[in-house]
Amino acid sequence: MHSPLPGSHSLSGFANPCRFRYIAAVQFGPLKLDSNLFLSPLAGYTNLPFRLVVREVGGLGLATTDLVNARSLLERNPKAFKLIETSPADRPLAVQLFGSVPEEMRDAAMFLESKGIASIDINMGCPVRKVCRVGGGSAMMTELNKTAALVRMMVEAVKIPITAKMRLGWDDENITAPDLGRALEAVGVAAIFVHGRTRQQGFSGTINLDGIARVVSAVKTIPVIGNGDVTTPQAARKMLEDTGCGGVSIGRGAFYNPWIFQHTLHHLATSKLLPEPRFEDRVRVMCRHLDLMVEVFGEEIGCRMFRKVAPWYSKRFGPANEFNKQVVRVSTKAEFHEILDRYLRWREQFLDANGELQLRFQPPPMVASFMQAPAVARREQIPVPQGPVDVW
Ligand SMILES: Cc1cc2nc3c(=O)[nH]c(=O)nc-3n(C[C@H](O)[C@H](O)[C@H](O)COP(=O)(O)O)c2cc1C
């Protein structure tokens, strides 16, 4: 479990009772969570090493695996088994399932419950054609009754919470999330995650906070967890304030900054902002991430996978082209450390007398899309990492 943080467990000592709702402990059915901040599934990235890194930094309530095909799990497919690989430090953990055959989804849920998984999330947001064609992912948002029947079968088969992750709807003319949320609440879903964009939008445009608020109003008692473009503690707070959602789920923002959960909890509890993580800390956590990748995937595959991970850390290093150019070819841990040592020497030219990055080389502060003017938001979209899926 992650280490306790100031303000993350106790609600006492706050002058303003309105703040309580920001950090109210969230409960998914019987599952009590220490924080209302969640790691969003990012296929190809939210593997065991990354989840452990985020947990070690702290502040996370619940992490979710990449999406896993229910049928592949039942067929004991080794790739699907690798996706659900976990460890005692990786708790509490939700597995995200996709599929459209009710019996398969039910049996996969029962199997995961028997393995000690804390919660199961159903993917209803994935816009990838391969997933939608078979009636999974965001296609589930277009067939409310069928989807509710599938979910009911899962809820009735297990004691652990079943949650659903959706977009606002298929397109602007079909904003189905409020109705679907209501229908799923009626069949016993424990929480709903909403990415504040439609399927048609992909990752373009800004997050529609009002759309998330409409899902919050549509359900009676279950928590709605807002999601999309949260890259700073202030953005998390705005999403909570403007939508009334019970928690915030963060994907790419955690990739830029594994400290985001810890810093957001602090901000919600105190209204203050912790300083940005120091360069040395970013490097330390990046090295820890690589160690865990090698531990879990072996040196060859772990290093190859790390080629797409390291450049996310370096986005906040300041000048880093030398590092990026070399790290995308890394094959061994020793080679990685040589690249890093060379980079640290190269980076010295950008430092001041105190060894800090000169102001003019520092990366600009992150600002979430929905906290910017629309024109700026369009220009400065968060990159969408490449992965086994082209579009999400
Ligand atoms: C590379 C990538 C992979 C993703 N994989 C999944 C997935 O497996 N399941 C899912 O429900 N959403 C997936 N998503 C969507 C994210 O969970 C999240 O809803 C979206 O990125 C918006 O949140 P963010 O702006 O905090 O990243 C993925 C997104 C990206 C960029």
Image (cartoon, grey):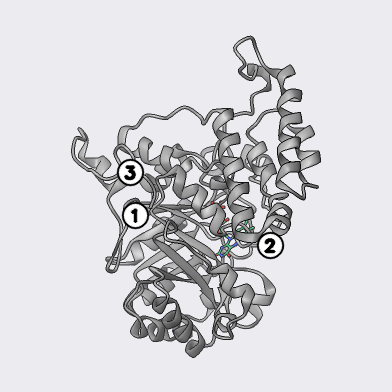
Disc 1 packing (10 Å; few <14; some 14–19; many ≥20): many
Q: Nearer the viewer, mark 2 or mark 3?
A: 3
Residue annotated with mark 2: 391
Say which amino acid is labelled 1: Gly
Residue annotated with mark 3: 4
Residue 313 placement (x, y as % from top left): 63, 40
Q: Label 2 to label 3, Cα distance in Å?
A: 36 Å
- Residue pictured at 55% horizontal, 36% vertical: 367
Looking at the image, which is closer to me, 110 or 212?
110
Residue 8 placement (x, y as % from top left): 31, 43
Say which amino acid is labelled 3: Pro
- Residue pictured at 38% horizontal, 75% vertical: 184
- In the picture, measured across the screen, residue 360 lies left or right of residue 282, that is right
Q: Quick one: label 1 or label 2, which is nearer the N terminus?
A: 1
Q: Residue furthest top?
A: 353
Residue annotated with mark 1: 246
Residue 382 placement (x, y as % from top left): 63, 45
Report the quarter where the C terminus lies: bottom right
Q: Label 1 to label 2, Cα distance in Å?
A: 27 Å
- Residue pictured at 49% horizontal, 83% vertical: 105
Q: Label 1 to label 3, Cα distance in Å?
A: 20 Å
| Tags 1 and 2 touching, CB below 8 Å | no
